[in-house]
Amino acid sequence: MTNDVKESFSADSPPAPAALAAKVRTLAPSMTRSMQRVAEAVAGDPAGCAALTVTGLAELTGTSEATVVRTARLLGYPGYRDLRLALAGLAAHQQSGRAPAVTADIAVDDPIADVVTKLAYDEQQTLADTAAGLDTVQLGAAVAAAATARRIDVYGVGASSLVGQDLAQKLLRIGLIAHAHTDPHLAVTNAVQLRSGDVAIAITHSGSTGDVIEPLRVAFDRGATTIAITGRPDGPVTQYADHILTTSTARESELRPAAMSSRTSQLLVVDCLFIGVAQRTYETAAPALSASYEALAHRHTPRSR
Amino acid sequence: MTNDVKESFSADSPPAPAALAAKVRTLAPSMTRSMQRVAEAVAGDPAGCAALTVTGLAELTGTSEATVVRTARLLGYPGYRDLRLALAGLAAHQQSGRAPAVTADIAVDDPIADVVTKLAYDEQQTLADTAAGLDTVQLGAAVAAAATARRIDVYGVGASSLVGQDLAQKLLRIGLIAHAHTDPHLAVTNAVQLRSGDVAIAITHSGSTGDVIEPLRVAFDRGATTIAITGRPDGPVTQYADHILTTSTARESELRPAAMSSRTSQLLVVDCLFIGVAQRTYETAAPALSASYEALAHRHTPRSR
DNA sequence: TCACGCTTGAAAGATATTTTCAACGCTGGG
DNA sequence: CCCAGCGTTGAAAATATCTTTCAAGCGTGA
């Protein structure tokens, strides 16, 4: 684990650090078939690819130079040359930082102890990837907007609804006016009330959940500041988002659906957002937090020791 | 310093690893004036030089491309291109060298990038601790009970209610009958319905949340198999628990209340429980999972690509 | 079935790297 | 002091590499 976090990658911005594999996964769905082949090769054997020229890599993947360059661009580099340099860096990196890595998928017949280990490892990986991939500029902007918002509405359905509720719950605790909407109809109805100075947050892993996009669009049209927390920075939801916070996409298996790791990723983003807001509203947040602790105290039976 | 010295110093041998600066010093005497200037620049700022083309480096050092290439050769590389790649690797290396191991608390004035790093690190720590501390025997027993349960009730209030909902949601998806109760009164009312063969799960970080203990007690008295997911294995809740799953308690700070890290821990436990159950009911779980995917598909707007 | 738009690779175009080669400057001998 | 010889140097040509363009191919939805 390193301190690369600062130089985040937001699809088309500065070059990536070490989270290349994560980026490939995030961007893979928006890639064409041949680009995916290239991306796969790159993610699979960075060191090997670093030794190849455009032509070499094109041949290796059975594609053309043009495709290789296009892939490099999509990954955020100005061209193949730069991707290659990054690859060289990454190779040196992984050569030194020996990581045993429990990479195997969770199988149906895995003993429960293995499940625990693998799952914990996967989630840790997801966290690292998310942190590395989070655009701190976007995050900063989102925090600033939320901290001064008159009112904050959060949209999320399915697994994401829990994340939305978590966020709203926490924001409420520090004295902000936040509400999580689960019902798509009510969400839209409420979104109509928003105006400039308000903040709307949509949470959707796929980036294309209509029930969540719709209220965000309404909020956007009403002039509210809109934030999208999504795993697909190129998805439809981002059309109506002033700020985009990208969650990472972990490899998924049959037993471990995407919803599971996306939740981990989303929660980290939401926590960062929350803490950022708490920092900026510290004067009011701190007393509000302790007040809520005390209010809860009497609901706990005395400790048994 | 490593054992690379031997191989890399004989002027025309394989490319150098990290001992580039040393090599430059050794070889410097045998270099011409302009070559020395180049070598000096390279040794002084590998990262910077890695960003330059031959022409760029030539200009920077006030020499010519030819000289740069000659220097690269002398240092043992086939050409400048390869020196540059090595330089990139070296740069990445030394950058990662300074991994400050973010142990500090999150402060009010931390820049947002630090918040992300620290938070991710903390959560990873929490996951590792939880995985290490989880009793796989208890977990196995809990899984076995849940997998064959007629009905599963989950109790959780406050932050834990979201975890409970998450668990219930997932169990429902694989065809089990699960319900998360948030309302303490309704929880008790429902607990009365339970009997042997049913499973009740209480989630409470403090282990002493009366609103959650009460329904678990009722379920316990009714003969249901009871499971407690708690951070306090010695808390009151465990009195009525057949199986205890322990979550870890991370150090907390003012800005990062315990609720935050406990949630991470709880979710990991819940995920393990879920996967364990899914494994044991694979025959029915797998089709149920894919069915729910398909049901969701049409709720997503077409991909933008 | 057709038309449209996206995907793709061949080839042209642009850049970067390597090589060549002539000029320059230094050194030592006449 | 001058000159020959040799090593050093950079300009420019040659080559390799990377990037862009563009038309053909392919899949998709009307």
Image (cartoon, coloured by chain):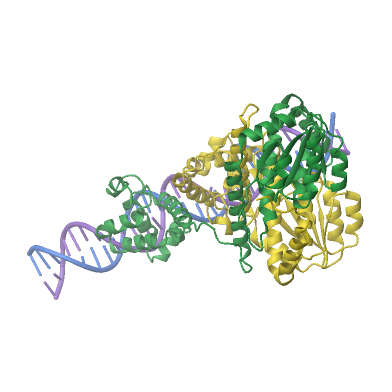
Chain colours: A yellow, B green, C blue, D purple
Q: Position of residue B159 (x, y in %)?
A: 75, 52
User: Could you tell me residue A38's position as x and y percent?
Assistant: 59, 40
Give whichever of B270, B60 is nearer the camera.
B270
Can I make out residue B85 in this image?
Answer: yes
Task: Tell me: D30 left or right of A148.
Answer: right
Q: Nearer the viewer, residue B42 or B160?
A: B160
Q: Whole-percent x and y of residue C19?
A: 36, 49
Q: Is residue A254 visible?
A: no
Q: How many marks?
A: 0
Q: Is B191 on the left-hand or right-hand side of A301?
A: right
Which residue is nearer to you in this view: B96 or A125?
A125
Q: Position of residue B103 (x, y in %)?
A: 54, 58
Residue at x-position 30% and y-position 48% = B5
Classify C2 as above or below A93.
Answer: above
Image point (71%, 68%), residue name = A286
Quadrant including the C terminus of chain B: top right
**Residue at figure coordinates x 54%, y 56% from the top left:** A3
Q: In percent of the image, x 82 and y 34: which residue is there?
A: B222
Of A198 and B57, nearer the camera is A198
